[in-house]
Image (cartoon, rainbow, N blue to C red):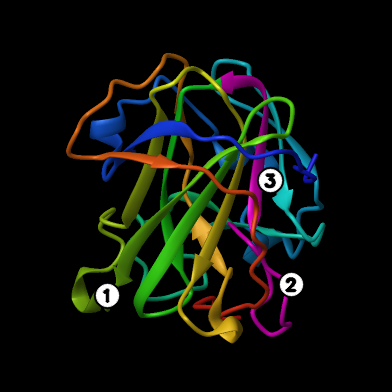
Amino acid sequence: MLCCAGVAYADNFVTYSSSAQQNPTDFIDWSQLGPDDTISGVTIPTPSPVLTAAGNLGLVGNTNLGNFLRVDAGLGWINSHFALGQHLVWTGNSNIVGSGGPFEIALATPVGSVGFGIEPNFFGPFTVRIDLYDAGGFSIGSVSFNENESFCGANCFQGDEVFVGVGDTTGVNISFIVINTDTGDPMFANDFAIGSPGFTYTTATPEPSSMVLLGSGLVGIAGVIRRKLAR
């Protein structure tokens, strides 16, 4: 868990910009990790076991082995695009450099696609990178998304957060998912929240408009960004 290394090779991927486009058949409900930490005051250790709705065993946590948070949108924080009360995980403490992600999801049964809503603790342009590995810990690709976290004003907690997703058109090969964010400043990287990740267990269908051919190993990003959590 949380140690992927191997000779990289490239799979083909399609990208998804919405859950409807991905059409997941399984998901992780983060509430199984406990109540909102603003209520419990408890952080979650890395690694922590989880189960998908279909019973796929997984381990999750920060790649630096630091604790992370279980939060619900709207309890103790402001200016979020997640739906009010949505169950999330947050990578860490923005007051300590390097205490956050990258965040990893390791699955006992490989999947053909993964997708999730994501929100950095930062307003403005940011990049999401998803590094993907097979069951042997070999890199099968890395896909990046250029996104923007806008001020929501009076329209916060509407469930219109940024969604990113990746499907493998080569086969059902995805066992390790490493999630990174970057705002261009190492002080404001890898402090982010994600919603319930969704999965499929079939090979993704190629779409020329969204297909990318990529191959790379894991590149760590150190740094943290300011949090929206108002404690």
Residue at left offset 25%, top offset 56% = 160
Q: Is residue 221 above or below residue 128?
A: below
Q: Residues within 10 Å of mark 2 (few under 14, many from 20)?
A: many
Q: Earlier in the sequence, mark 3 or mark 2?
A: 3
Judging by the rendered image, the residue that carries numbered circle 2 is 99
- Separation of residues labelled 3 and 2 (CA atoms): 21 Å
Which disc, if any, is residue 34?
Answer: 3
Mark 3 or 2: in front is 2
Residues drawn in magenta? 90-110
- Separation of residues labelled 2 and 1 (CA atoms): 24 Å
Q: Position of residue 107 (x, y in %)?
A: 66, 28
Q: Is residue 97 magenta?
A: yes
Q: Position of residue 80 (x, y in %)?
A: 37, 68
- Separation of residues labelled 3 and 1 (CA atoms): 29 Å
Q: Is residue 69 magenta?
A: no
Q: Is residue 77 above or below residue 22?
A: below
**Could one spot residue 74 in this view of the protein?**
no
Closest to the observer, 39 or 133: 133
Looking at the rendered structure, the kind of residue marked 3 is Gly
Quarter of the rendering occupied by the C terminus: bottom right
